[in-house]
Structures are given as C-alpha cells and as structure tokens.
Image (cartoon, rainbow, N blue to C red):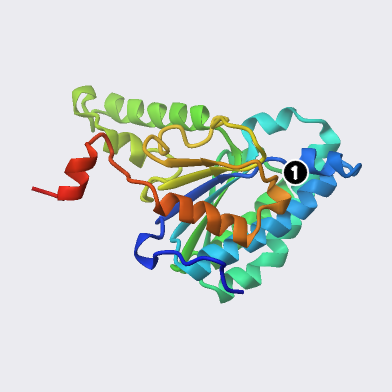
Amino acid sequence: MSAPFALDPDRIPNHVAVVMDGNGRWAKKRKKPRLYGHKIGADSVRDIVETSAEIGIKYLTLYAFSSENWNRPEHEVSGLMNILKSYLVSELGKMEKNNIRLHCIGDRSKLPNSVQDVLQESIEKTAANDSLTLNLALSYGSRDEICTAVRSIAEQCRAGTLKPQEITQSHISAALYTAGQPDPDLLIRTGGEARLSNFLLWQASYSEIYFTNVMWPEFRREVFLKALLDYQQRERRFGKTGEQIQRGPT
C-alpha cells in the first residue's frame, strides 16, 4: 500500500518510541468492554511493526504495559496478559521471517510464568535477527529503571571498579534496559493525552515528541507515516542554534 505522501529515505528516524494510549476509551465510546479496545489495539501493533520494518526504522519501542498498570482491575490485567501471550505466539513466525529481533524492557519477573515462557522463547528465536529491534516495554517504569541503574553503578563503586567522580552519562546509559541502543529520535503518544507517563525519561531527553488525538486502535500505517513526515520537517538542534546546524561541523 503506497503512502499518500513521500518520506525522505535519508531522514527516517533510527529509533521510534510509542506510548500506545486510548484503547479503553476507544472501546467505551463504542459501548464495548475495555479489553475489546486492547484486542483491536493488537492489530495496530502488527501494522506499525510491519510498517517500521518496511521503511527502515531500526528500533521500535512500544509501551505495552507499565509498572503502574498492575494497579488496574484484576480481570483487565489478566485479559491484557492473555492478549500479550496470544500476540507473541501469533507473531513469532512473522518476526523470524521479517528478520525482526524481539527485546523486552521492564521487570519481566512480575509477568505470569506462562507469559515469561513465551516471551523468552520469542527473544531467543529472534536473537540473531538484525533488521528491526522491537522493544516491548512490559511491567516498565522509567523511574524504577533509573533506580536499578543507580544501584548497579553503586555496586561497581563499592567493588572498587568505578570511582564516583568517574561516573558519566555513558555509565548510566549502559546500566539501563536499553543499553547498547540509540536513544529515541521520535516519541509518539496517541489518545489525546500530552504527558510522558514515566516512559524513557532518560532516553527521551532530546527526542522529538509527537502527540495525536488518534486513539491507538485507529493508529495505523497512514497516521504513523504522517507522524514521521512531521518529524522530518523539524530541525533537531540538541542545544545549538539553527545557524550552527545549517553550517554543519566546524
């Protein structure tokens, strides 16, 4: 399916992160249970993953289940876990075929054992793939991630392998779940809300942010490409002036 507009192939973001919001509200508007929205939202995940692989995005991070989501009603959490498990089972073959590597960020130990087993199998079977890395943020919270990183660095200092005055931003980045991956170039949030919700707070420091009122179940290929086109029209300065960026390195 061709896009109604052309993206610049030289300005495709290397890493896109998405807060997939609006499933429950989308379903409620249609007088359906919230889990119905989550099930349809899984179709959006398939569409965005396939589009990302097709156009050359190298890393895609999807905020699938936050550490705070455990506080939702038990039946909704259980339903979400079943949807996640079904998605992993159904998509493994496609990920292998399309050279997609699955990675998980978050506290996997809190996931049901059956989900952990399927997740681990998918991670192992796609480990050698190198076209697109799909990061699923599961039981993920950025503040918890940063605390874990700080504890890891503190242990290095206590062991004498690192001095406090030697700690750099690189040390912190290397202790995060996304170690070895580039920071997101573009962070998208669907569903009409305009906040980060404890998502990639360290990594998104210089990400371009795109908010849309489109609910996640309706966030499909064309809406995604529109967000990417908006990204390509921005000037990324990283603290410099526009004139410096235009002149290039000196």
Image vertical order of residue 102 relative to residue 93, above or below: above
Measuring from the top left, give residue 234's x and y in whole percent.
38, 47
- Above or below for 166 versus 233: above
At 51% across and 47% down in the image, what residue appears? 17
- 136 or 183, which is in the foreground? 183
Count every numbered label the image shows and give the total.
1
Q: In which quarter of the image is the N terminus?
A: bottom right
Q: In which quarter of the image is residue 98?
A: bottom right
Residue 247's spot in the image, x, y percent? Answer: 15, 49
Mark 1 is surrounded, within 10 Å at the Cα level, by few (under 14), some (14 to 19) or many (20 or more) other residues, namely: many
The answer to which of 118 and 51 lies nearer the viewer is 51
Q: Residue furthest left?
A: 250
Answer left or right for 158 relative to 66: left
Does residue 37 appear to the left or right of 20 in the view shown? right
Which sits in the foreground, 169 or 214? Answer: 214
> Which amino acid does the dot numbered 1 rest on?
Asn
Going 40% across and 51% down the picture, which residue do you hit? 233
Q: Is residue 90 visible?
A: yes
| Residue 118 falls in image quadrant | bottom right
Left or right position of 56 against 169: right
Q: In which quarter of the image is residue 147?
A: top left
Say if 42 sits above or below 2 in the image.
above
Q: Is 51 placed above or below 68 here?
A: below
Residue 229: x percent and y percent?
47, 56
What residue would you read off at disc 1?
Answer: 23
The residue at the point 28 percent across, 34 percent down is: 169
Is residue 60 among what the camera can see?
no
How far across and how far down the image is residue 200, in percent?
Answer: 48, 37
Seen at 59% across and 68% down, the residue is: 95
* In-front residue for pair 214/109: 214
